[in-house]
Amino acid sequence: MIDYEPVIGMEVHAELLTESKMFCKCKVDFGGAPNSRVCPVCLGLPGSLPVANEKAVEYVVRAALALNCTISEESLFHRKNYFYPDMAKNYQISQYDFPIGSNGWIDITVDGDTRRIRIRRVHLEEDTGKLIHAGGNESLVDYNRSGLPLMEVVTEADIHSAEEAREYLVRLRAILTYLGVNDGKMEEGSLRCEPNISIRQKGTAKLGTKTELKNLNSFRAVFSGVQYETERQTNVLNEGGKVIQETRRWDDANNRTASMRVKELEQEYRYFPDPDLVALHFTTDYIERQRSILPELPDEKKTRLMEKWGLPAYDAEIITDSRAMADFFEETVEHCPDAKTVSNWIMGDLAKLLNAAGLDISDCKVKPVDFARMLTLIQEGTISGKIAKGVFDDMFETGKAPDAIVKSGGMTQISDEHEILGVIDRVLGENSEAVAKIAAGDMKPMGFLVGQIMRHTQGRANPEVVNRLLKKRVAEPAN
Amino acid sequence: MELFQLTAHELHKKLKSREISALELTQSVLGRISSVDGQVRSFVTVTNEIALETARAVDKQIAGGGDVSPLAGIPIAIKDNMCTNGVRTTCSSKMLENFIPPYSATVVEKLAEAGAIMVGKTNLDEFAMGSSTENSALFVTHNPWNLDKVPGGSSGGSAAAVAADEAVLALGSDTGGSIRQPAAFCGVVGMKPTYGRVSRYGLVAFASSLDQIGPITKDVTDTAILLGAISGKDSMDSTSVDIPVPDYTAALKNDVRGMKIGIPKEFFAQGVRPEISEAVMKAVEALKALGADYKEVSMPIMEYTLPTYYILAPSEASSNLARYDGVRYGHRSKHSSDVMSMFMKTRDEGFGAEVKQRIMIGTYALSAGYYDAYYLKAQKVRTLVRQAYDEAFEEFDVLISPTAPSVAFGIGEKANDPLEMKLADVCTIPVNMAGIPAMSMTCGFYDGLPIGMQIMGKPFGEETMLQVAYTYEQNTDHHTMKPGL
């Protein structure tokens, strides 16, 4: 059997977090009644004209810089002409041969190997409206989305596995959300990913026929979709078939892709410069000013966390995938400098609870300072690690401070030797058989006895003290 | 003299001194429309009620004291390709026959603020594509000087309305001569300002990089007044230019001494009738007698402007007119079974032959494989045209040529000869290609029909043009002639 590898290029569309639309003053927002955020411009009424949103241009320049792109001195808007009912003008204002940014890259790490994914271009365009099929022979159009500013990021075909595809998207999303230009919400469609996938015999250069994947609404879908499509194409070729050029839709419920439409011809878009808009000119001053206000980006932050707090690369990578997560980490370690413990808790218990609740860390009720306090309570021996998990569940649920929870729940750890000895003696008295076995040299019942002691103290006894005192007691029983 | 016969600056004095009221004036003009428009057919829509209501409001304002703006109370006609909130804007097309815009063009807003009174919307060649107003899908407009002749186009309705005293002022739009050529045919003054001088927001686009709104008036002074009122940077139009608007009336000086006039010989070739060349040269001699100097200049690139224009304008039009698909507004075919057939039948039924032809030419010129040979090449020619003008203006203050190769032709005469029809714009098209300003004014008559002289100026050189035009007007009496309606 021939060994194939996938060759993947990614197109990502990111809605920009501007206040108004790309070419008019309509508000950018979600929800609301259909066609409630429209005006002559985004409805394409006769005589209306577009005016480019400077903030959107600025956002794309910043994103392009963060993606290590070259910024064009002159950038043009082109019209992409095609007929579709969700298009207010039957052309989309986009960019063609003079995009804002080009020739950039992102480094990704998969299984410890770092690879460079080249970015071909970063450009700005307007979104289309949305078709709603009303049933029967009728369709409705909602133009609220028409004219939203959309940034497109296109890679070279440098991606060669589903893991890389997912990791590329994770890092791209991190960069865009760090910049604050996109909210990263794939489920809501504000970050949309469309990979082009073909396969080729490993070690050869000739590219196969590609398919384009749509409807990938999560990182998991990107991974599974690319993996499925790679396997599907491999099977087609192994069975002597031919891959056809088409757009395929990821079916999340059934975990498979299905054909949407076959691309028989190259689409004819009749691109030409939009005469209603003037060229964008970027001076070196402007570009450098934008560069100077870039925030710390994921890679820089990762390096810094490793250097400053001694985090392992793996932890630093995961923590910096989200700016909010990294901020949470940093605020916590300010108050509880045991960085590894903090990152363990964030990647473990906190991530688990967030996932289960379907929340982003930015929605989390636990304040970093309280989180740090809880970890300190463990370190100081006030509560046990086991108790701490319950306390943390409560903090996550209610946002209460850990001290309050511990106090009201009587969860303080018992380390007082006198108190613990009392319990030990009671347990030993109740379990003479076990004591006898131990006396005969069979140490097995020790674990059972520890369990009984913890049960009597509702788990609050300091395990270390219990172990020490118990050992001592069975070795030299009191009277 | 009836009120409707006067110019805006004459009427302004009477309004300001309260010799007349805006209501009286408006009634006079509306009366004129109802008595002659049955023959001339300038108007697609007459906005009687709005006009009277506005006039009353203006009178109230004047009575309240304070400044009376030069346009307050002055009746004006608007070409029906400029959006008017709540008033049907048809572009003289079946496609938009019942389209009522929910917003007004910036120029319409500016006029309203200045207190001008819109009396109606005027006929045009469908979507401004044509040179005779015969391409209107609604009806044909007649030349007030001779009802068997065309008024020119595409702003034929606006030019005819001013010539027939159905409006004191009018707005036209000019993509390849659509203000200047009908102004010439109808014996009025028409100006295409520098590209970017006037906002295009709300002007239904034909060819965005060439379209420009401008005044059509009875004399040069009114052109200066109206130009001042509509000019200026508009935040809604990225292509409008942020250059301060001067007081154009200050440029109205009866003095051309030392002025250097270029006579581009290519504009006198290409089928220009001898009677036209003679009249224009006579006017140039008159200016020379008043102290100007003139010299012939050659601009060989002009030979290529017509074919170049007929690639660029249709290319942009093919995209601009794509939005008329029956989904959101305008005509929608009742005979469609799915979205694609709705698009196709709507456009088939809604557009006239000339519009369809231009959409097809433009679609072709922009297609992969042809783009470089047509659109891109045409853009390069355009750059050369601009350079040719730049060079000429290093030497000359203005250039003078005929506006059109002939006087107004007969209705139906060129309907079957599209090439001959397009040659009617040969003198005006280069101006749009270069984005420079130009105006047309009457410099004589032939066969009872006005002859137009075109004055071309440097970018944002409207003042110099106006000065030359004003001087010529002050020393001649063509502008006092009225058609015998």
Image (spheres, grey):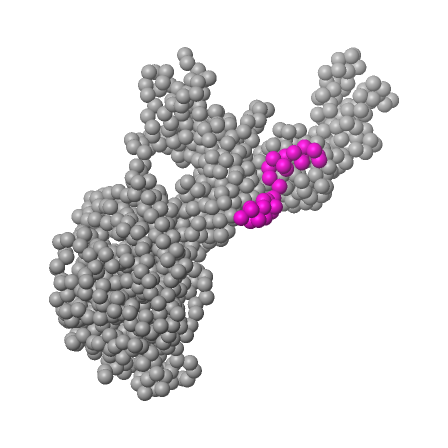
Answer yes or no: is residue A247 visible.
yes
Main secondary-structure element of the magenta-colored stretch:
helix
Picture coordinates of residue B167 (x, y %)?
A: 26, 73
Residue B204 found in image quarter: bottom left
Q: Is residue A358 visible?
A: no
Quadrant hosting residue B298: bottom left
Report the front residue among B369 and A125.
B369
Q: From the viewer's perspective, tell me whether residue A128 is left or right of residue B31.
A: right
- Which residue sits at x=39%, y=70%? B258
Q: Position of residue A351 (x, y in %)?
A: 59, 35
- In the rendered image, which quarter contains the N terminus of chain B? bottom left
Q: Position of residue A452 (x, y in %)?
A: 71, 26
Q: Is residue A204 above or below residue A412?
A: above
The residue lying at 52 percent from left, 35 percent from top is A104
Identify the image quadrant of the C terminus of chain B.
bottom left
Asked if the magenta segment contains residue B254, the reply would be: no
Q: Position of residue A320 (x, y in %)?
A: 60, 36
Between B350 and B186, the one lying in front of the other is: B186
| Magenta stretch bounds | A283-309
The residue drawn where x is 73% and y is 23% is A449
Taking depth in this image into account, of A38 and B34 the one nearest to the observer is: B34
**Looking at the rendering, which quadrant does residue A303 occupy?**
top right
* Relative to B394, residue B110 above or below: below
For image coordinates 34% across by 52% down, the residue present is B385
Is residue A289 on the magenta stretch? yes
Total count of labels: 0
A108 horizontally vs A97: left or right: right
